[in-house]
Amino acid sequence: MRLSVIGCGYLGAVHAACMAELGHEVVGIDVDAGKVDALNRAAAPFFEPGLDETLRKAIDSGRLRFSTDFADAATAQVHFVAVGTPQKPGENAADLTYVHAAIDALAPHVAPGSLVVGKSTVPVGTASVLVQRLQAVQPEATLAWNPEFLREGVAVTDTIAPDRIVYGLPSGADGEHAKALLDEVYAVALGKGTPLVVTDYATAELVKVAANAFLATKISFINAMSEVADTVGADVTQLADAIGYDARIGRKFLNAGVGFGGGCLPKDIRAFRARAEELGVGDSLTFLKEVDAINVRQRERVVIRLREALGGELAGRRVAVLGLAFKPDSDDVRDSPALDVAVRLKGLGADVVTTDPRAIENARARHPQLTYEPSVEAALRNAAAVVVVTEWAEYRDLDPEWAGELVAGKVIIDGRNALNPLTWRAAGWTYRGSGRP
Ligand code: UGA
């Protein structure tokens, strides 16, 4: 099929590359000429394992190109809108500026009978407004809502082989037409038996934010348990294992530590609350305020643990912070708990030296006041304490004996419960995890 993807950020670039990989003919449109140039050279402007290779293959096959000109989307049968919906500055609500701009710029180029598909995460009720905006310009176009559930770090596989597909469709003939086109787009995944939920706009929009709200709640739940565990000397990792064996609960997303961050979970739970308040059902989502508060509190808990382990004084102490990205296998530092901990420690007068395998440049652009070292070895040298805040494999696998030779003080704060306390203690380290005795 001939597809266009409007907005070539994380979601759009991955979607465009993967749709071409599946055999479709794809044009990605973005207003940022630098991004378009990089993508045409198969160089994604962010780190995502496997994406550059997928881009290269698709571009070489002649099925994928990127452009700044919306007119290049005109021949597509299906247009995906994948622009960002960031948090509004100083507010909880989502900023829909880019979604509106994308629809307005695209609408004049949409051919009669074509389908526009929203993929961006939007407040419930957005699609029913956008369809009017679209059809005011092209009355013979159809709108569908098709939320995306990809995770950074495994975005390519999540897009090629999603665990479910959701269509939010209008009723009647328009809906049937949209379903037929989407079934063709996703023929490979559907052919493999991927579950498909066909529903209305509002449900499709809600599915996305409800999924992220549930995941955020699960993480804050286990972090709340870790706070209780800390006070009574219990072990939250064993607690998570034990409750996780119950198939109704499940062990995934029950890792206690410094909490969730990134470009999705934090802003999505805030936007969801803001939308619920607008709809007069704010009480239904009051708990998400607590989920957010528990999450942010975990960053401070790491700082407190470190201060205690260093005998109460942080000022002037050299601290190695391992990790800046919001999670491993990513260079994304948006709302990163790791970067936030580094900034807090610096603000308290510590001599902070940070490192990360991929995220240094992004972190430096936001916080030039921090010291960045590309190698773990340099970051550890002469540190009075070490803080692990992103569980990259190379930090999980650190040898405590080797690290012990480099540091000035053998104190390690495990902000992700990613290390084995027994091996670290056996090597003479003071180890402090989250909710671990
Ligand atoms: C999240 C969702 O998982 C995706 O399904 C969704 O498509 C995406 O948001 C989105 O809305 O676009 P992502 O932001 O890539 O994906 O990250 P996650 O893997 O969900 O991790 C989020 C944060 O939670 C990370 O900071 C991670 O370190 C933290 N986390 C995760 C924990 O603290 N504990 C856990 O047990 C799991």
Image: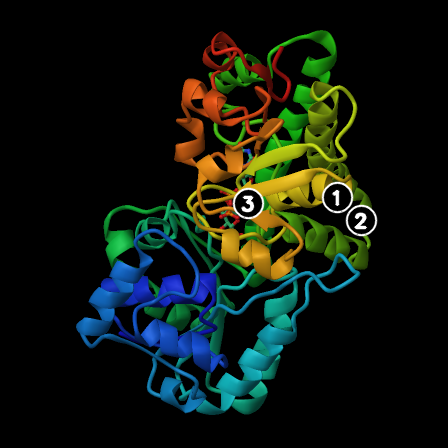
Residue 324 is marked as 3
Task: Write the residue at 63% across / 59% down.
Answer: 366
- Name the kind of residue labelled 2 in the image: Gly
Q: Is residue 251 visible?
A: no
Mark closer to the chain start, 1 or 3: 1
Q: For marks 3 and 2, give the CA distance.
A: 34 Å
Q: Against 252, is 242 above or below?
A: above
Q: Which residue is mark 1?
A: 285
- Contact (CB < 8 A) between labels 1 and 2? yes
Visible residue check, residue 390: yes
Spot occupied by residue 391 in the image (x, y as percentages of width and height): 48, 34
| Amino acid type, callout 3 | Leu
- The residue at which mark 2 appears reads as 282
Check whether the beta carbons of the residues at disc 1 and disc 3 lie within 8 A of each other. no
Percent of width and height locating residue 138: 50, 89
Where is 145 relative to 394, above or below?
below
* Three-letter code, disc 1: Leu
Of 382 and 221, which appears nearest the observer? Answer: 382
Q: Which mark is residue 295?
A: none
Mark 1, ligand 1, within 8 Å: the answer is no
